[in-house]
Image (spheres, rainbow, N blue to C red):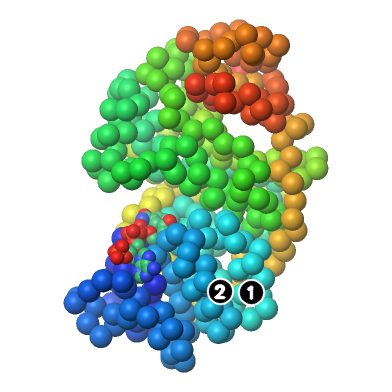
Amino acid sequence: MKIALLGYGVVGGGVWELLKNDNRLSVKSVLVRRERPELGSAAVSDFQEILNDPEIEIVAEVMGGLHPAFEYVSAALKAGKHVVTANKALIAAYYNELTALAKEHGVALRCTAAVGGGIPWLCNLERVCRLDRIESVSGILNGTTNYILDCMTRQGRDFAEVLKEAQELGYAEADPTADIDGWDIRRKLVISANIAFGVSVKEEDIPMAGIRGITAADIAAFQENGLVCRMIASAEPAEGGISAVVEPKLLPASAPEAAVPTNYNRISLVAEKLGPASFFGQGAGRFPTGFNVVQDCIDIYDGCRNFYSDKAEPVAVANDNVLRAYYLRTDKPELFADMTAGSMGPGLITKPVSVSALYERAADCQFLASLPQNFGKE
Ligand SMILES: NC(=O)c1ccc[n+]([C@@H]2O[C@H](COP(=O)([O-])OP(=O)(O)OC[C@H]3O[C@@H](n4cnc5c(N)ncnc54)[C@H](OP(=O)(O)O)[C@@H]3O)[C@@H](O)[C@H]2O)c1
């Protein structure tokens, strides 16, 4: 089966290497926008050449961004080509359009690498869904934020210093906004929740809080109380739709997520019959991410012709009746007087409050993190 790669960066280069000697799949063309002598005659500068090539059955989009990725992927699906992508921004933003196009044209649309990099998460989520009902999905979906929180916790260092180190090591982008403020994680949560629950939620409806404001003093206070901070995305069916949040969460030091080191990810589900299942591994990187792109291509070679779910019922994000207690640090404590239950180090602790109500005031928090459900009750 012949493949065209759109993009030849970190992930595209990994896919190229992984398929070099494969006898099932071969990369015939690579869309590039500058000279790539190492690709020889495979380098192509005009997407139409790929679209009009009847030999190319799979288009693997690994260039990122929304445009022209959306136009290229849509055109490929309409032309009857299977599409594999690692692009979470694209799938989260155009979930309904792209899954409908794939269905209409009877072709595969796969994006396993888009959530969890090299972790076989979406393909296993699909397997669980075909036999069981998913009750929740949650976990650590971003290596950059985990690296920063893990270093701050183990070494007592400050946020800015650890972020700089993460950038030097290539674990964080020069512009870290998408990671540290939660955007990247929210896209992965949208895709996971949509597949898990057969729904379609809007990215912008999910509240998120990042780790930009966390300090060494916050971490010291958490440690004194036996707590570890991790960036957690979670979603589950709730009254009126799907409850979904992306936020720092304080976990008992004994929780499995608290032990996730450096830039690793850990993604979990709970299903009615199966119970809990968790997946741990590398959420990014040339070979881990390229690995899942190639695995999707092999699934297509083996006959896969679908997306992970054939349902995409539009639903609301419903956090009104979900109650959580929070740690928060603010220079306007008077605004939180009605929900304050105590203090912890430099911050205050709320009583259990509606997640929606808390996020209405999130702009007045310098940092916030949800507390374990039984905090203070053991
Ligand atoms: N890196 C990871 O570990 C990882 C993990 C999971 C998912 N992903 C996803 O995988 C995708 C690719 O990420 P990456 O890290 O490989 O990015 P990258 O290293 O920046 O590579 C992107 C490549 O696409 C090329 N490109 C961009 N727009 C193009 C266009 N219009 N025409 C032709 N080529 C174009 C770029 O060309 P130039 O070199 O000329 O700029 C570059 O070679 C993204 O959607 C990302 O979210 C990445």
- Between residue 84 and residue 228, name the one nearer to us: 84
- Badge 2 density bin: few <14, some 14–19, many ≥20, Cα 10 Å: some
Q: Residue at x 66, y 9 (%)?
A: 337
| Quarter containing the C terminus | top right
Q: Residue at x 25, y 85 (%)?
A: 41
In the drawing, does residue 74 fall left or right of residue 311? Answer: left
Q: How far across and how far down the image is residue 167, in percent?
A: 28, 40
Q: Residue at x 45, y 13 (%)?
A: 221
Identity of the residue furthest to the right in this view:
240
Q: How far across and how far down the image is residue 316, in percent?
A: 74, 46
Q: How far across and how far down the image is residue 171, in percent?
A: 31, 44
In the drawing, does residue 32 fall left or right of residue 190? Answer: left
Helix, strand or loop at mark 2: helix
Q: Is mark 1 within 8 Å of ligand 1?
A: no
- Badge 1 density bin: few <14, some 14–19, many ≥20, Cα 10 Å: many
Q: Which mark is residue 74?
A: 2
Helix, strand or loop at mark 1: helix
